[in-house]
Image: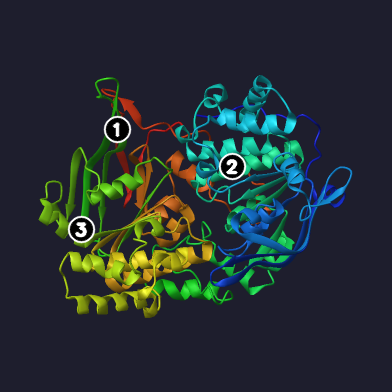
């Protein structure tokens, strides 16, 4: 489905060029800003004496890892830190209105209520938690318009419809009556953008607006914000930890580390002539699509503590990695289907089915990493869960070590799960907050009665060291660790019973880029040491290129292309694969103006009426390990 809605503009806007920016005024000036939070342990200095400005029509990217203070800075501009227990302790935040400068640190609540939404608007990372679930999206956009522009109900709803059309939502007349849970992640983010821009703000703050989205939807949202900025002439502060996204959007970049400003410059200088070691380390940690061209095996990321070793590190690391054992598969998936019934009506009859996985075939070999890639809803996570029989399949066969797992009894299924383990996307949700992480790691060993308590504790300490955590961490609870540390704990738990296969479901997608690189390196090293086979489920093609031996591309429950890493990344054949690769942001601002053919619109629904079976497209062998569906999918 494509969206060909015309671009709208209510007034003439100058093209955003360096010359234009030099002649425009600063819409926002921040001088010596400091923010602190108080808790039971004392005072946390979240932002320390930072200064910056942003001009009308300009995009300033504030980058850094979790805890760097970038989001706190944005909340301080909106004067929202007070509601989270924070306090601005020093500095000025000067907003340059048409006729005067206002210091937002001293503005009254009445002034801030007028400024928020009307002059300065904000898009948050997770639209589902930012939108009210009991109101339609149209009502929520209209509320902001009524509050700031004084329009009546009908006028504000008409304006809300115009905004939905302006953010390129097809069938806006229907969408305006829907509730947030009825929309996809990409559409919810577009609604948030429509709400933020409804009153034509002069400054838009976008706080990680694409982090949780598929790479294809991310590319659409980045493109949309850029187009709307040109149409409306507004300034944008773009907050992110993804340097690839920064290269796509930023005119200037501010790098933050532990609450401090460590480097600030135009985007070209930041990417091509970084000065601070932390900036260099951030750039080294960015997985660059195409960096593995000509190599057949995965490769470690360079030493993140020494940003000058990138080239040598990769070359030296490659020969040390062993090839998988392709003599006999450890896992075989044959003509496999998983569907979910949908019941409706007075008699609760099955009227529709979700065709989550449709007749897929693949093998997995010892010591191999097979990546399953595709957009949300393509069936990759359902495939992983079906292999462990966390959800039941309707057709096909899965064999582990040559034995079918479809009809295993409870005791046999428990034995299977000892050999196949799962690493989930959200480590915080996968760990029990009431028990120490030491017990979380030994719990599966004790449940399966593999060792005594003393032996299990010894094994637990060995695993903590193996995943790069101190043994003292065993007595702490999940909330006391960072996201990257919690993911290491989940990896240790998955390894506790010496599994032969580990399924990693989006296990690095929510992590900062340097933490992501550390986890990828850890998985590669563990595979080399223990001979584990990985199914790596991801939508991040740049990470997949780094870690995988083979790649299977899924679309609407079917595998449309499968082959070696080189086949997929260096010689993609299916149009959907090519567009997935085109959507990956390039960490080079000089290439942002290159035309890229992107996927548009929403992925079609996998829900079908009973009796309406999907067409199964057979794979054609192209040679070696490379297979592709020859039928073109419209998206």
Other residues around mark 2 within 10 Å, as few (<14) / some (14–19) / many (≥20): many
Please tell me which residue is depicted at 86% across the width and 42% down the height of the picture. 98
Residue holding disc 3: 417
Which element is circle 1 on?
loop
Residue 378 appears anywhere in the view: yes
Label 1, label 2: how far apart the Cα atoms are: 32 Å
Residue 520 appears anywhere in the view: no
Label 1, label 3: how far apart the Cα atoms are: 31 Å
Look at the picture and state if 154 lies above or below 383: above
Which element is circle 2 on?
helix
Q: Is residue 493 left or right of residue 300?
A: left
Q: Earlier in the sequence, mark 2 or mark 3?
A: 2
Q: Nearer the viewer, residue 361 or 293?
A: 361
Percent from the top left, x then y, of residue 513? 52, 62
Which element is circle 3 on?
helix
| Tag in front: 1 or 3 | 3
Q: Quadrant of residue 440?
A: bottom left
Residue holding disc 2: 221
Q: Nearer the viewer, residue 73 or 525?
A: 73
Label ID, residue 616: 1
């Amino acid at each position: 489905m494509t969206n060909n809605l015309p671009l709208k503009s209510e007034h003439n806007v100058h093209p955003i060029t360096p010359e234009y920016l030099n002649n425009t005024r600063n819409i926002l000036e921040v001088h010596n800003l400091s923010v602190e939070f108080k808790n039971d342990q004392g005072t946390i200095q979240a932002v320390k004496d930072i200064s910056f400005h942003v001009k009308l029509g300009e995009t300033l990217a504030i980058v850094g890892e979790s805890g760097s203070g970038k989001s706190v800075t944005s909340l301080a501009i909106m004067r929202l830190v007070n509601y989270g227990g924070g306090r601005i302790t020093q500095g000025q935040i000067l907003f340059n209105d048409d006729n005067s400068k206002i210091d937002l640190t001293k503005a009254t609540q009445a002034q801030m209520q007028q400024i928020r939404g009307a002059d300065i608007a904000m898009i948050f990372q997770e639209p589902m938690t930012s939108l009210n679930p009991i109101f339609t999206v149209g009502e929520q956009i209209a509320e902001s318009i009524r509050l700031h522009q004084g329009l009546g109900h009908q006028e504000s709803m008409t304006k809300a419809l115009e905004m939905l059309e302006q953010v390129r939502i097809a069938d806006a007349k229907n969408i305006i009556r829907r509730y947030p849970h009825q929309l996809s992640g990409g559409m919810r983010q577009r609604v948030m953008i429509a709400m933020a821009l409804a009153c034509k703000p002069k400054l838009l703050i976008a706080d990680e607006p694409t982090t949780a989205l598929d790479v294809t939807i991310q590319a659409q949202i980045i493109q949309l914000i850029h187009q709307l900025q040109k149409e409306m002439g507004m300034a944008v502060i773009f907050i992110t930890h993804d340097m690839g996204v920064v290269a796509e959007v930023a005119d200037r970049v501010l790098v933050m580390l532990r609450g401090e400003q460590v480097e600030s410059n135009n985007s070209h200088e930041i990417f091509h002539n970084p000065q601070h070691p932390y900036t260099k380390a951030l750039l080294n940690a960015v997985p660059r699509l195409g960096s593995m061209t000509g190599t057949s095996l995965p490769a470690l990321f360079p030493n993140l503590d020494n940003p000058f070793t990138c080239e040598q590190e990769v070359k030296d690391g490659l020969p040390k990695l062993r090839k998988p054992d392709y003599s006999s598969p450890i896992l075989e998936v044959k003509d496999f289907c998983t569907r979910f019934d949908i019941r409706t009506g007075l008699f609760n009859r099955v009227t529709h089915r979700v065709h989550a996985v449709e007749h897929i075939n693949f093998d997995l070999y010892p010591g191999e990493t097979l990546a399953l890639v595709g957009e949300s809803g393509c069936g990759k996570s359902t495939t992983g869960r079906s292999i462990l029989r966390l959800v039941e399949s309707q057709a096909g066969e899965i064999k582990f070590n040559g034995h079918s797992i479809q009809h295993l009894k409870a005791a046999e299924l428990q034995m299977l799960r000892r050999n196949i383990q799962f690493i989930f996307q959200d480590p915080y949700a996968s760990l029990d907050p009431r028990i120490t992480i030491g017990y979380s790691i030994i719990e599966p060993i004790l449940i399966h009665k593999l060792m005594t308590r003393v032996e299990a504790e010894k094994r637990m300490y060995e695993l903590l060291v193996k995943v790069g955590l101190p043994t003292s961490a065993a007595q702490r609870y999940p909330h006391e660790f960072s996201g990257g540390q919690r993911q290491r704990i989940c990896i240790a738990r998955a390894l506790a019973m010496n599994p032969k296969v580990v399924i990693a479901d989006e296990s690095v997608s929510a992590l900062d880029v340097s933490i992501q690189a550390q986890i990828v390196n850890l998985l590669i090293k563990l595979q080399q040491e223990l001979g584990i086979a990985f199914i790596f489920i991801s939508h991040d093609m740049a990470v997949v290129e780094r870690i995988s031996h083979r790649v299977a591309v899924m679309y609407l429950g079917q595998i449309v292309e499968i082959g070696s890493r080189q086949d997929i990344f260096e010689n993609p054949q299916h149009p959907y694969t090519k567009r997935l690769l085109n959507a990956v942001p390039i960490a080079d601002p000089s290439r942002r103006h290159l035309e890229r053919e992107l996927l548009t619109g929403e992925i079609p629904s996998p829900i079908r009426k009973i009796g309406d079976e999907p067409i199964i497209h057979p794979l054609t062998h192209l040679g070696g390990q490379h297979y592709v569906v020859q039928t073109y999918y419209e998206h």
